[in-house]
Image (cartoon, helix red, strand yellow):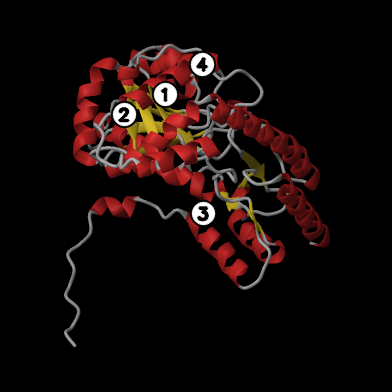
Amino acid sequence: MLPPTPLPPLAARLDRVEPFHVMELVKHAVALERAGRSVIHLSIGEPDFTAPPPVVHALQRAVDAGATGYTGALGLDALRRAIARWHGDEFGVDVDPHRVLVTAGASGALLLACAGLVDPGAAVLMSDPGYPCNRHFVTAVDGVARPLPVGAAQRFQLDAATVRAQWASDVRGVLLASPSNPTGTSIAFDELARVVDVVRGHGGFTIVDEIYLGLTYDHAPRSALALGDDVVTVGSFSKFFHMTGWRLGWLVLPPAWVPAFEKLAQNLFICASTLAQRAALACFEPEAMAVYRARRDEFRARRDFVVPAVRELGFGVPVAPDGAFYVWLDASGFTDDSDRFAIELLEATGVALVPGKDFGHHEPQRWLRLSYATSMAQLREAVERMRRWLAAA
């Protein structure tokens, strides 16, 4: 047997990409299930709903028709028009379809945005807590992710005062998410406008991740696109449209940037999945939209159950979520180590929550994320299991 051949070193940037810790907890939960345990997954940000029948039927028709070749790098023209029209119907903002670039999921959109806007060594401001992959998209293009600690008084979101105070000579722009993962909170629209004005005044870019904008509950959702053609937004078919594994998203770009981003997309991705694109056209049919709106009402009902329920258990919820399907829980009344607490909770009760360490470095040991993207029956059972365990502790 030949001795192993020494391998060349990996790129240094990989040392700056942290593991996705939630996936380790999920593997632990799955192992418990395989051993015969009953596990309630309140960990993964994936709707328990799947694509409605019109979308599935559209996929089948595309397969049967052999419509599987490449599309243009910008995406199907019909889908770009449908996405633009949806922004008008849902958010009251007029979007030129030529500004829409269809991508391989919101992750593909964010990677393209960072590749097109972030030079090596340039810093991008974002919130802490925040979605961990956003930091790593910046790192992947040798930029510097600069998460800024934000608390309940700021709705766990960047505000204009923070951006103004933290802007420095190396900062290139901001990456926001509204509503956000992990907190489920939105940036008030007037505050978002002030943030954009600060960034614009420094000649920077503003990217707003709006993948949960369709899942807004307490007020009419407003897109950052209403603040000017220079704002970049990210959308997705994963959350509101329940097509997580189909890997389809989009960017809305300033008109002058579209050719440059088309060039990037041609080289990095060629195109998003043709079958997913053709199926997604059916998302905007009246029958499918009725299903999505009913499911949004169900998510709202779940939130309205679970927030008071976990508060009654003794968890803090300093800011009630107004969108997405997450609750950001303050577990400091029970533990000074949310990672250990999450593991103990899982092993004792079969309830899987996510510890805060994935989402930033500002007091992560204090926080847990609960995803209510599961049935009301499962949520009720999870709350009861936690109640019994906490009472016996």
Q: Which x, y percent locates residue 57?
A: 48, 39
Q: Is residue 217 above or below residue 369?
A: above
Disc with the residue nearer the chain's start (3 vs 1):
3
According to the image, label 2 marks what residue? 76
- Secondary structure found at label 3: helix
Question: Mark 2, residues whose alpha carbon is within 10 Å: few (<14), some, or many (≥20)?
Answer: many
- In depth, the one of 222 and 318 nearer the eye is 222
Disc with the residue nearer the chain's start (3 vs 2):
3
Give the amino acid at mark 4.
Answer: Asp
Give the amino acid at mark 1.
Answer: Ile
Q: CA distance from mark 3 to mark 4?
A: 35 Å
The residue located at (33%, 40%) in the rendering is: 65
Q: Is residue 177 above or below residue 25?
A: above
The residue located at (18%, 68%) in the rendering is: 7
The residue located at (71%, 41%) in the rendering is: 316
Q: Residue furthest front?
A: 64
- Secondary structure found at label 2: loop
Give the amino acid at mark 2.
Answer: Leu
Q: CA distance from mark 3 to mark 2?
A: 34 Å
Q: Which mark is residue 22?
A: 3
- In depth, the one of 203 and 276 nearer the eye is 276
Q: Which circle, 3 or 4, is nearer the viewer?
A: 4
Q: Quadrant of the C terminus?
A: bottom right
According to the image, label 1 marks what residue? 83
Labelled pair 4, 1 in contact (Cβ < 8 Å) = no
Q: CA distance from mark 4 to mark 1?
A: 10 Å
- Secondary structure found at label 4: helix
Q: Which x, y percent locates residue 289?
A: 56, 27
Give the amino acid at mark 3.
Answer: Val
